[in-house]
C-alpha cells in the first residue's frame, strides 16, 4: 500500500511541474500588461513598477525566481491590489471555498446515497423511478441555472433563506451548499443504484438471505461496501468538479472564496493572482485525486491486486 | 435509415438470423421502441433545423429593438416577451441556440477527429507506440483542464475558434481511450486475422474492417459529449469568459436573465428551459443509443 502511495505521489509531481510551467509561460503570452491603466502612465513610473515587480529581468530568470518563491509558499505580489500578496488573498479565500466544497460533498453523498439505496431496493417501482427522474433532472439542470432558480424560489418568493453571503446571516450557507451539491447528488444516486443492483444480484447476497439475515443487515453490511465501488471511483472527479463549480456558486451568491477571486482576477488581468490561484487549485485537484485513488484502491481488493502487479 | 427493413413485422429476436439484419437496422428498431430516446432525437432534430434556418424563421431581425417597449412579458407580438432593451426574446433565443449548438457540435468534432486517430493508432500498433501514446493521455488526464480552458480564454483573444479548440482539446482524451480499447478488442477477432491472411493492406484493414466497428461506442460517447460541451460553453459564458457580445448563446442569455430575474423572471426561465431541454434530450438519446447498439439487448428491450 505504501509503495502504491509513493508511486502515485511521484506521478503527481511532474504533473504539478507541467501545470506551473505552462501557466507561467501562457500568462507571459497574454496581451496587455498588468499596468495598462486607463490613463497612460509616464515611462519612468512604468519602469519603476517593472523593477519593483521584477518584470525587467529576463523571462527565464523570472521563471526560476517564481519557482523558488513557490517552494517557500510565496505566490508573489498581487498586481491589482497593491501592497497585498497573492498568498494573503489566497489565505482568506481558500478556507471559505473548502468549507463550501465540504458541505456540498456532504449534500451530494447523503442525498445521493439515500436516493440510490431507495431506488435499488425496489427496482422498477415508483420508489425507483421517482428518485431516478429527479436525478436525471439534477444532471441536466446546470449549477448556474439551479442556483438562481433556488434563490428566486426560496430567497425572493418565499423569503425563507438569505440570497447571498457566507456566514453573515443565519442560514446563508444552505442555498450555496445545495446548489453546488445537488448535481453531484444526482450522479451519485445513479452510480450507487447501479452498483447496488449489480451487487444485489450476486450469489453471496442470496446466501445471506438464505441464512435469514434481515434486509437492513444485508443492505448495510453486505451490499453497501461492494456497491459503493463506482461511487468511490467517482469521488476524485467529483471533488475536482466541486472546486471548479465553486467559481459559479461563489459568483452567484457573492461568496468571497477562491473561485470568485479567480474569476475576478481573470477579468482584471491580475496575472500573478491568476497564476497563483491556477497553480493552487490545480495542485489541490491533483492531490485530492491521488487521495481518492488511494482510498478506492484501499477499499477494493481487486484494484489492489492489479496495482501490485504493475 | 432503411425503412423497408423496419416496416417489416418480423419477430426480431436479437440474433442476426435468417433475415440478415444489419447491426444498424437492428439498433434502429431497438431505438424506435425507446420513447424517451425518440423524444430526445425529435427535440435535437427540431432544434437543429431551427438553428440552421434561424435567419429565415426568426420573428424579428437579430438586432431589432423597440426601446419604447422595454421588458414586457410574453404576448401575441412577442411570444416569449422582450428583454430590458426591448429585443424579442424568441429571436435572441434562436440566434443564441445557433451558437450553443454550433459550439457543441464543432468542439465535439475536434475531439472526435483527434480521439479517433490517436486511439486507432495506439490500439492498432500496440506495444511501445501504444504505451507511449497512452502514457501521454494519462498525464494529460491528471491536469485540471477546466481551469486551463479558462486560462486560455483569459490569455488569448476570446474567439469562437479558440473556444472550439480549447474544449475539443479536453474531450479527446476519453474518446482516445474508448477507441483504443475497442480497436484492441477488434484486432484480436478472427476476421481481422482472416483479412491479414487474404493479403489486405494495413490501410484497408484499418479503414474497411476496424473503423466501422468502432463507430458504435463512439456514437454513444459523442451523443453524451455534446451536452457536456454545451454545458461547459454555457458555464464559461455565464462567467463572462465564453461567447462575447454582440454574439450570444444560451449561457449568455441565462447570465443576463439572472441579473433581472426578480423583476423579469421570464428572461431567465425561457433560456433555462431551452438549454435544459436540449441537455435532457441529448442525454436520453445517448442512453438510448447505448442500449440500442449493445448487441446483448434485444428489440423487446430486455437484456439477453
Image: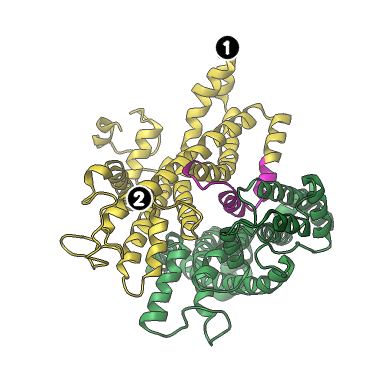
Q: Is residue A59 above or below residue A76?
A: above
Boundaries of the magenta span: B137-161
Which shade is chain B?
yellow
Question: Is B117 placed left or right of B31 in the picture?
Answer: right
Evaluate whether residue A57 shows in this view: yes
Q: Is residue A297 above or below residue B14?
A: below
What residue is at 71 percent from the left and 50 percent from the top?
A24
Q: Which chain is green?
A: A
Q: Which mark is residue A289?
A: none
Q: Which residue in the structure is indicated by mark 2?
A: B97
Where does residue A164 sit, x and y in percent of width and height? Answer: 50, 78
Dividing the picture into quadrants, the one containing residue A188 is: bottom right
Where does residue A141 sit, x and y in percent of width and height? Answer: 42, 62
Furthest-left residue in this view:
B76
Q: Which residue in the structure is indicated by mark 1?
A: B199
What residue is at 69 percent from the left and 53 percent from the top?
A43
Evaluate whether residue A112 shows in this view: no
Cβ–Cβ below 8 Å for labels 1 and 2?
Answer: no
Furthest-bottom residue in this view:
A170
Quadrant where the C terminus of chain A sits is top right
Dominant secondary structure of the residues highlighted in magenta in the image: helix
Amino acid at each position: 500500500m505504501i509503495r502504491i502511495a509513493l508511486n502515485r505521489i511521484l506521478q503527481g509531481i511532474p504533473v504539478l511541474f507541467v501545470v506551473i510551467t505552462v501557466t507561467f509561460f501562457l500568462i507571459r503570452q497574454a496581451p496587455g500588461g498588468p499596468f495598462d491603466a486607463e490613463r497612460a502612465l509616464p515611462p519612468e513610473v512604468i519602469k519603476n513598477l517593472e523593477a519593483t515587480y521584477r518584470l525587467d529581468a529576463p523571462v527565464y530568470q523570472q521563471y526560476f525566481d517564481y519557482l523558488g518563491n513557490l517552494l517557500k509558499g510565496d505566490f508573489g505580489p498581487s498586481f491589482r491590489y497593491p501592497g497585498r500578496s497573492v498568498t494573503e488573498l489566497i489565505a482568506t479565500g481558500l478556507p471559505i471555498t473548502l468549507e463550501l466544497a465540504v458541505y456540498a460533498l456532504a449534500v451530494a453523498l447523503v442525498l445521493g446515497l439515500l436516493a440510490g439505496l431507495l431506488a435499488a431496493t425496489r427496482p422498477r417501482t415508483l420508489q425507483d423511478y421517482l428518485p431516478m427522474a429527479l436525478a436525471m433532472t439534477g444532471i441536466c439542470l446546470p449549477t448556474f441555472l439551479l442556483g438562481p432558480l433556488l434563490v428566486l424560489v426560496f430567497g425572493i418568493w418565499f423569503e425563507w433563506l438569505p440570497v447571498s453571503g457566507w456566514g453573515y446571516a443565519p442560514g446563508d450557507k444552505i442555498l450555496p451548499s445545495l446548489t453546488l451539491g445537488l448535481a453531484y447528488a444526482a450522479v451519485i444516486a445513479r452510480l450507487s443504484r447501479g452498483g447496488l443492483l449489480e451487487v444485489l444480484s450476486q450469489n453471496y447476497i442470496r446466501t445471506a438471505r438464505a441464512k435469514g439475515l434481515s434486509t437492513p443487515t444485508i443492505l448495510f453490511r453486505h451490499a453497501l461496501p461492494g456497491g459503493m465501488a463506482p461511487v468511490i471511483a467517482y469521488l476524485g472527479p467529483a471533488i475536482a468538479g466541486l472546486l471548479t463549480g465553486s467559481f459559479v456558486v461563489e459568483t452567484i451568491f457573492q461568496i468571497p472564496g477562491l473561485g470568485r477571486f479567480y474569476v475576478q482576477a481573470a477579468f482584471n488581468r491580475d496575472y500573478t493572482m491568476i497564476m497563483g490561484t491556477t497553480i493552487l487549485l490545480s495542485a489541490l485537484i491533483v492531490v485530492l485525486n491521488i487521495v481518492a485513488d488511494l482510498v478506492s484502491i484501499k477499499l477494493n481488493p481487486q484494484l489492489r491486486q492489479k496495482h501490485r502487479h504493475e | 435509415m432503411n425503412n423497408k427493413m423496419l416496416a417489416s413485422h418480423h419477430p426480431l429476436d436479437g440474433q442476426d438470423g435468417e433475415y440478415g439484419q444489419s447491426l444498424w437496422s437492428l439498433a434502429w428498431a431497438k431505438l424506435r421502441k425507446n420513447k424517451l430516446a425518440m423524444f430526445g432525437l425529435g427535440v435535437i432534430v427540431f432544434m437543429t433545423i431551427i438553428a440552421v434556418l434561424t435567419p429565415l424563421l426568426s420573428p424579428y431581425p437579430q438586432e431589432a429593438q423597440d426601446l419604447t417597449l422595454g421588458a414586457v412579458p410574453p404576448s401575441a407580438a412577442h411570444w416569449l416577451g422582450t428583454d430590458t432593451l426591448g429585443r424579442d426574446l424568441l429571436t435572441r433565443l434562436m440566434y443564441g441556440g445557433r451558437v450553443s449548438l454550433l459550439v457543441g457540435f464543432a468542439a465535439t468534432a475536434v475531439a472526435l477527429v483527434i480521439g479517433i486517430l490517436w486511439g486507432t493508432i495506439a490500439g492498432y500498433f500496440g506495444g511501445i507506440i501504444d504505451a507511449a501514446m497512452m502514457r501521454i493521455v494519462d498525464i494529460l488526464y491528471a491536469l485540471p483542464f477546466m481551469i486551463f480552458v479558462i486560462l486560455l480564454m483569459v490569455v488569448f483573444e476570446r474567439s469562437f475558434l479558440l473556444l472550439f479548440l480549447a474544449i475539443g482539446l479536453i474531450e479527446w482524451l476519453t474518446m482516445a481511450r474508448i477507441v483504443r480499447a475497442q480497436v484492441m478488442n477488434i484486432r484480436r477477432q478472427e476476421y481481422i486475422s482472416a483479412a491479414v491472411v487474404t493479403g489486405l493492406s494495413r490501410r484497408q484493414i484499418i479503414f474497411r474492417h476496424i473503423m466501422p466497428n468502432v463507430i458504435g461506442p463512439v456514437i454513444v460517447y459523442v451523443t453524451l459529449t455534446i451536452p457536456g460541451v454545451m454545458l461547459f460553453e454555457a458555464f464559461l459564458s455565464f462567467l463572462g469568459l465564453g461567447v462575447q457580445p454582440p454574439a450570444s448563446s444560451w449561457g449568455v442569455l441565462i447570465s443576463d436573465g439572472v441579473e433581472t430575474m426578480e423583476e423579469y423572471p421570464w428572461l431567465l426561465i425561457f433560456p433555462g428551459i431551452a438549454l435544459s431541454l436540449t441537455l435532457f434530450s441529448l442525454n436520453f438519446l445517448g442512453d438510448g443509443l447505448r442500449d440500442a447498439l449493445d448487441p446483448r439487448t434485444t428489440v423487446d428491450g430486455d437484456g439477453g
